[in-house]
Image: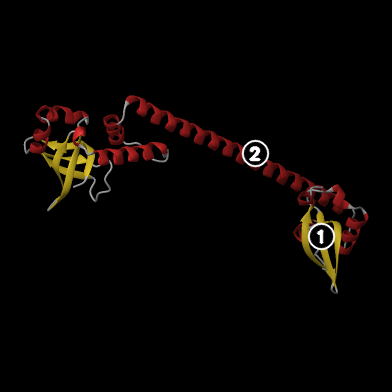
Amino acid sequence: MPVDFGRVENYFSDRGFGFITHTFAEANNRHVFFHITTIKNLNLTMANALDREIQSGSVYFWYRFDNATKGEQVIEALDVRDITEVERLSFIENIHKRYSDIRVVLSDGVEAATEDLLSESDISALVLARKNSETKKKDLGHQRQSKNEAKHSHHNEQGTLEENEFNSLVIEISSQGFTETKQVSNYIVKKKLGNKYPNISGVLEMELDGHKWNFDGGFPPKIYARLCTEIGLSNQKSRAKPGMFTSYKILGR
């Protein structure tokens, strides 16, 4: 029969029975039924003090349990010295895994069982290792947060630069009084506006009748279409078709 450790959560002294929690066992029920006679067989003093101590939630004990008709039931209450060496080593291994995994919340039952099974020096080493892991996790979290904030700040800053350049481009083109988009295109090429507005320009691949070439200093189709809309001109597309656009930012210029 399996062994587990738990805390007495409910005890009805007038009826002589109660319920104890699971700590390690992967069982179907959270609570296991016990009768006071099983406690008396282990420790008469504990049984007599049960009424008083249960109110503080400080009564713990080891037990063997089995499935009964109405659910799991304590068959035998145990002293820690009654646990076999194999069982002891299994519980200690389980405790080490829980302490080393900082995602696991250590229950009162685990901490109480740890005090029963390990020496003070071993417990101190476990607690220290867990605290160090928690500190490292917090430090990594802070580092990630700082990187994300810096990245977000850079993104916002870059977005502001691009918007400012686009607004300046609109003002410059509007001042020319153009009536056709062809005039806009010629002006962009003649004045080499790509060099003046590097955050929104780059190298634009063009194609005409199967012939491809790179337009160094061009604006992506979305920017050009938005520019035409801002200055009140419909985009009169030429036979040349825009292809892949590579911004100067990606090119590192």
Q: Is residue 23 above or below residue 215?
A: above
Residue furthest toward the right? 190
Q: Is residue 40 left or right of residue 244?
A: left
Q: Position of residue 68 (x, y in %)?
A: 13, 51
Q: Is residue 19 above or below residue 203?
A: above
Q: Position of residue 53 (x, y in %)?
A: 17, 28
Q: Which residue is more in the foreground, 233 or 5? A: 5
Which type of secondary structure does the marked residue at label 1 adopt?
A: strand
Q: Which residue is mark 1?
A: 204
Which type of secondary structure does the marked residue at label 2 adopt?
A: helix
Task: State the CA–CA distance, disc 1 to disc 2.
Answer: 30 Å
Q: Is residue 134 left or right of residue 222?
A: left
- The answer to whether residue 9 of the structure is visible from this angle is yes
Q: Which residue is more in the foreground, 133 or 144? A: 133
Q: Position of residue 80 (x, y in %)?
A: 21, 33
Which picture quadrant has residue 129? top left
Which of the two labelled residues, at mark 1 and mark 2, occupies the earlier sequence position? 2
Rendered residue at 65%/38% (across/down) = 150
Rendered residue at 23%/38% (across/down) = 5
Rendered residue at 62%/39% (across/down) = 147
Local crowd size for mark 1, using a 10 Å CA cut-off: few (<14), some (14–19), many (≥20): many
Which picture quadrant has residue 74? top left
Q: Which residue is mark 2?
A: 150
